[in-house]
């Protein structure tokens, strides 16, 4: 497991800043994950995000797409999602409320006959 800084190691003066950093974006993504089988979180101009979305579309898998800026905008929002999820790159793909990773992990699951991801069924 990736070690996380204990809340005891965060000074009380900054605890609220740390715990609420762009919490509205985290809440928005959390709500989408709770409401939808497949959620892709990405950003404009990222070719890997586009590949993941295209793969899902070609497979006939419905998904919700949430986009937060481009390479030069809204990086604070994307940073809050990285801090929250522990996943450092985009896309972030969630299936049945579970982070499955990014495009490479999605491609492996789409090719795997043993994938036990119920929302990755074709519509």
Image (tube, rainbow, N blue to C red):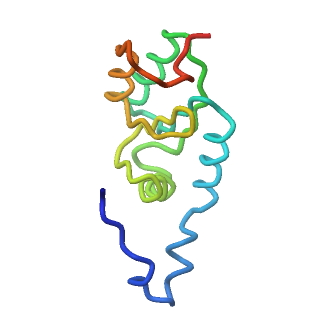
Picture residue at 35% right of the left edge, 44% below the top = 89
Q: Identify the image quadrant of the N terminus.
A: bottom left
Residue 26 lies, with reference to residue 96, above or below; the image says below
Picture residue at 42% right of the left edge, 30% below the top = 49
Picture residue at 49% right of the left edge, 18% below the top = 56
To which quarter of the image does residue 67 belong? top right
To which quarter of the image does residue 9 belong? bottom left
Picture residue at 65% right of the left edge, 49% below the top = 28
Residue 98 lies, with reference to residue 61, above or below; the image says below
Q: Is residue 109 left or right of residue 93?
A: left
**Residue 66 horizontal/vertical position (percent):** 58, 38
**Residue 4 horizontal/vertical position (percent):** 36, 67
Q: Identify the image quadrant of the C terminus.
A: top right
To which quarter of the image does residue 65 belong? top right
Residue 46 lies, with reference to residue 76, above or below; the image says above
**Residue 34 horizontal/vertical position (percent):** 65, 41
**Residue 13 horizontal/vertical position (percent):** 51, 90
Q: Is residue 122 left or right of residue 106?
A: right
Residue 120 lies, with reference to residue 7, above or below; the image says above
Q: Is residue 100 left or right of residue 15?
A: left
């Amino acid at each position: 497991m990736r070690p996380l800084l204990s809340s005891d190691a965060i000074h009380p003066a900054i605890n609220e800043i740390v715990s609420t950093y762009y919490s509205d974006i985290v809440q928005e993504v959390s709500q989408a994950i709770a409401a939808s089988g497949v959620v892709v979180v990405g950003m404009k101009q990222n070719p890997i995000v586009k590949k993941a979305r295209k793969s899902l579309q070609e497979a006939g898998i419905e998904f919700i797409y949430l986009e937060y800026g481009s390479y030069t905008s809204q990086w604070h929002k994307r940073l809050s999602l990285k801090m929250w999820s522990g996943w450092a790159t985009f896309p972030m793909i969630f299936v049945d409320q579970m982070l499955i990773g990014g495009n490479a992990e999605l491609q492996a699951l789409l090719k795997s006959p043993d994938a036990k991801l119920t929302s990755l069924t074709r519509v």
